[in-house]
Amino acid sequence: MASLSSKALENAIEQFATLPGIGRKTALRFALHMLRQKPEEVKRFADSLTALKTDIRECKRCHNIADGDLCEICGDSRRDASTICVVENIKDILSIEATGQYRGLYHVLGGVISPVDGIGPSDLRIDSLIERASDPAIREVIFALRATIEGDTTGYYIYKKLPRRDEITVSTLAKGIAVGNDLEYTDELTLGRSIVNRVRFSM
């Protein structure tokens, strides 16, 4: 792309181009679109991005994103507080919530165990999950992790750490999600059925 006569426009394009999957041509379209907007609309857009870093916190209970100490899901008294669905990241929560088939709580690990990538159990939020699962009020822990060796390894590791008591069930998503697929790329119908028809976890 040829150099531009406006340094301000060039800077905007460079910033848009830092976003995942955004090339310079798309970044140029974004920048020109913003250039056509009213100043107050551009400010509102910029303020919303700034708020991502200044206002958003991590939920103290499940590690989801939150505006306060607890996220909206943990703070909702209508949710089933006896069930914890263990996910890798925040995007997985959005995917599961989109199905409308799950009404329990979540726990975000922040990844999966992957020695190749230098990620071990201590790098994940496993200890806080075990602490939550030790509460007698918890009746089920659901593993909603990717169907890969890393996902399975993480599930096995957590399973061995979970408290052993008759009242708690450890389950995993039913078959239907393709091996190797991340939850965010699974269609809502398949994911929803996998949650509803979840099966007992076994080693």
Image (cartoon, helix red, strand yellow):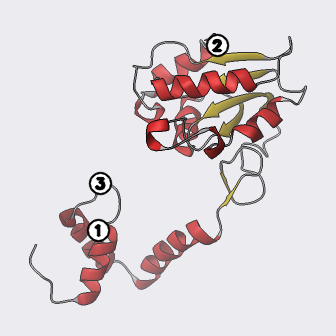
Give amino acid for label 2. Answer: Phe
Task: Indicate the position of residue 138 as horizontal and vertical percent values.
Answer: 83, 26
Residue 176 appears left or right of 133: left
Residue 179 appears left or right of 31: right
Q: Residue placed at 50% from the left, 23% from the top?
A: 191
- The residue sitting at the left extreme is 2
Task: Indicate the position of residue 145 as horizontal and vertical percent values.
Answer: 55, 28
Q: Nearer the viewer, residue 132 or 159?
A: 159
Label 1 belongs to which residue? 30
Give amino acid for label 1. Answer: Phe
Task: Indicate the position of residue 71 as horizontal and vertical percent values.
Answer: 72, 50
Label 2 belongs to which residue? 201
Q: Residues within 10 Å of mark 3 (few under 14, many from 20)?
A: few
Element carrying mark 2:
loop
Give amino acid for label 3. Answer: Gly
**Contact, CB < 8 Å: mark 2 with mark 3?**
no
**Contact, CB < 8 Å: mark 1 with mark 3?**
no
Label 3 belongs to which residue? 21
- The residue sitting at the right extreme is 136
Q: Is residue 71 above or below residue 138?
A: below
Labels 1 and 3: the sequence-earlier one = 3
Q: Nearer the viewer, mark 1 or mark 3?
A: 3
Residue 22, picture quadrant: bottom left
Element carrying mark 3:
loop
Q: Nearer the viewer, mark 2 or mark 3?
A: 2
**Circle on res. 165:** none
Q: Quadrant of the C terminus?
A: top right
Residue 128, picture quadrant: top right
Q: Is residue 71 above or below residue 85?
A: below
Whether residue 74 is visible: yes
